[in-house]
Image (cartoon, rainbow, N blue to C red):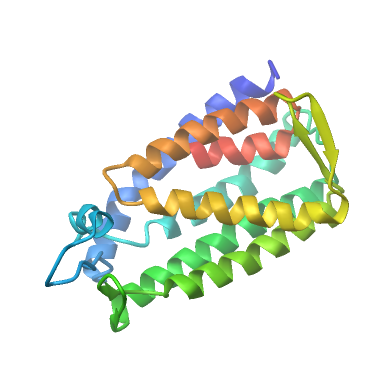
Amino acid sequence: MTNLLPLALGLVMFSFLVTSVFVVPFINLLYKLRLTRKKEAPRNGKVPLFDKLHDKKAGTPVGGGVLLIVVVCLLFAMIFPIASRMGVFIETAYNRRDELAVIFFTFISFGILGIIDDLVKTFGRPVRGVLGRVFGLSRKQKFFLQWILGFIIGWLIYHNLGVHILNIPLLGKVLDLGIWYAPFAALVIVSFTNAFNITDGLDGLSCGLLMICLICFIVIAAGGLDTPLSIFIAIWLG
């Protein structure tokens, strides 16, 4: 852990500098392409608090996740091989290829889902919903696709990585879920995804929560001596 944390801190700073170079030109590009958030609140009647808060961000660019995905993937592809050649001991409890496959499938698949939703929101026609106009994919469509991805990821974690145990530290119990770990993982993934989506666009609240979570995750990954995951989170955090 003592060797991984300084490396992770350096990667956070490097990733931040690289992203800072491209973020302003990329945002300008989004404005030129008119990829901006639209108002979704109903024009008449009572406006739900959720729509009222989100509509304050109308006109701001969407699709910033594209830059995030590209930068993280490219930096990881460059840094990970270099780190191993520079003497950084690559350690993980899982098969390295399988672990990286799970990490990047999760990262890219949910990123693509978000990008599709943003594109449909921008260029698609609004659909009248219960609480007002709905832009992008409907809640049912997104929820269905999230569950599909969640089950695939849960199965990959269970089958490819061999994870099937749930540790509950506060109760001092370890539960062997067996094959039921896959649907449990899907439930956790979908729940956290939607909890995060609620805060998206609310004055940086989602970014702040994400940073807190990633800092905790990188400490856990470094403590567990999971080098690939530590490097990935460090680049993402930057």
Query: Toward which corner of the image does residue 170 lie, by quadrant?
Result: top right
Name the residue: 52% across, 53% down: 193
Q: On screen, 80 above or below 153?
A: above
Q: Residue furthest top?
A: 2
In the image, 168: left or right of 210?
right
Instruction: Name the image quarter holding the N terminus.
Output: top right
Query: Toward which corner of the image does residue 123 lie, by quadrant?
Result: bottom left
Measuring from the top left, give residue 103's x and y in whole percent: 67, 51
Residue 206 or 43: which is nearer the viewer? 43
Residue 68 or 216: which is nearer the viewer? 216
Name the residue: 28% across, 68% down: 35
In the image, 44: left or right of 76?
left
| Residue 19 visible in the current orientation | yes
Residue 148 or 215: which is nearer the viewer? 148
Name the residue: 13% across, 72% down: 43
Q: On screen, 208 above or below 162?
A: above
Name the residue: 28% across, 50% down: 24
Query: Toward which corner of the image does residue 104 lie, by quadrant?
Result: bottom right
Q: Residue furthest left?
A: 44
Measuring from the top left, give residue 55's x and y in whole percent: 20, 59
| Residue 93 visible in the current orientation | no
In the image, 54: left or right of 166?
left
